[in-house]
Amino acid sequence: MTRVLIADDHAIVRKGLKRCIEAEHDVQVAGEAESGAEVLALVRAQDFDVVVLDVSMPQGSGLDVLAQLKREHPQLPVLMLSMFAEEDLGVRAIRAGAAGYLCKSGAPAELAAAIKRVASGGRYVSAALAQCSPQCQHQVKNDADARDARARKRGTRLVALDDRG
């Protein structure tokens, strides 16, 4: 069962996201947050497989919260959710460590597919971002590959330190 944390400052949006997510039999909404501070507190206290994080949040923008999550939990996939289809914002989110970027205007099935994709270690970008310029696509791929290589290197170092006792 994939455990998801939903983070959006609008209760009605969280409820809609929860209904979409829980329509999938193998995905469970295990927590909800309405602010950046609440996201960080929940992730520090509980285990989640994926965080669905709105770009625009009170008490820390979504991108600021993403940066903090990546520092504290580099392996935790974060799917950024936004009402903006702007390629610049999507690229910034991917560069900052997001495993995916999805527009709120997407279909409910797209949300479920995105969660499953990032939970399994993949990447997901909305159709709007995927259709950005070839230069933008190249930059997104290079940034994601470099970030993954750094995370693997950190993970290898942590395992090596654990093995030494």
Image: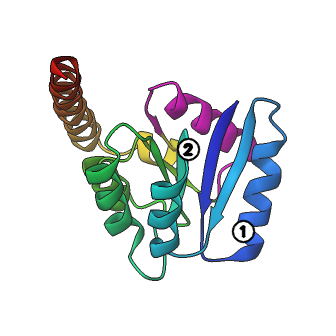
- Residue drawn 30% across the image and 60% down it: 68
Residue 153 sits above or below residue 37 on the image? above
Place of residue 15 in the rendered image (x, y in percent of width and height, measured from the top left) = 79, 64
Q: Residues within 10 Å of mark 1 (few under 14, many from 20)?
A: some
User: For the residue marked with disc 1, what is the amino acid?
Assistant: Val
Q: Residue 50: name its quadrant.
A: top right
- What range of the chain is rendered magenta? 105-124
Which residue occupies the foreground of this view, 129 or 5?
A: 5
For marks 2 and 1 on the same chain, the one whose residue lies earlier in the sequence: 1
Q: Which residue is mark 2?
A: 48
User: For the residue marked with disc 2, what is the amino acid?
Assistant: Phe
Q: Secondary structure at mark 1?
A: helix
- The quadrant the N terminus occupies is top right
Place of residue 49 in the rendered image (x, y in percent of width and height, measured from the top left) = 55, 38
Q: Which mark is residue 13?
A: 1
> Can residue 81 be seen at all in this image of the molecule?
no
Q: Secondary structure at mark 2?
A: loop
State yes or no: discs 2 and 1 in contact (Cβ < 8 Å): no
Place of residue 10 in the rendered image (x, y in percent of width and height, measured from the top left) = 67, 77
User: Please, what is the dominant secondary structure of the magenta stretch?
Assistant: helix
- The quadrant the C terminus occupies is top left
- Residue drawn 30% across the image and 43% down it: 133
- Residue drawn 25% across the image and 30% down it: 148
Query: Left of 22 or right of it: where is 161?
Result: left
Query: Left of 145 or right of it: where is 58?
Result: right
Q: Is residue 77 magenta?
A: no
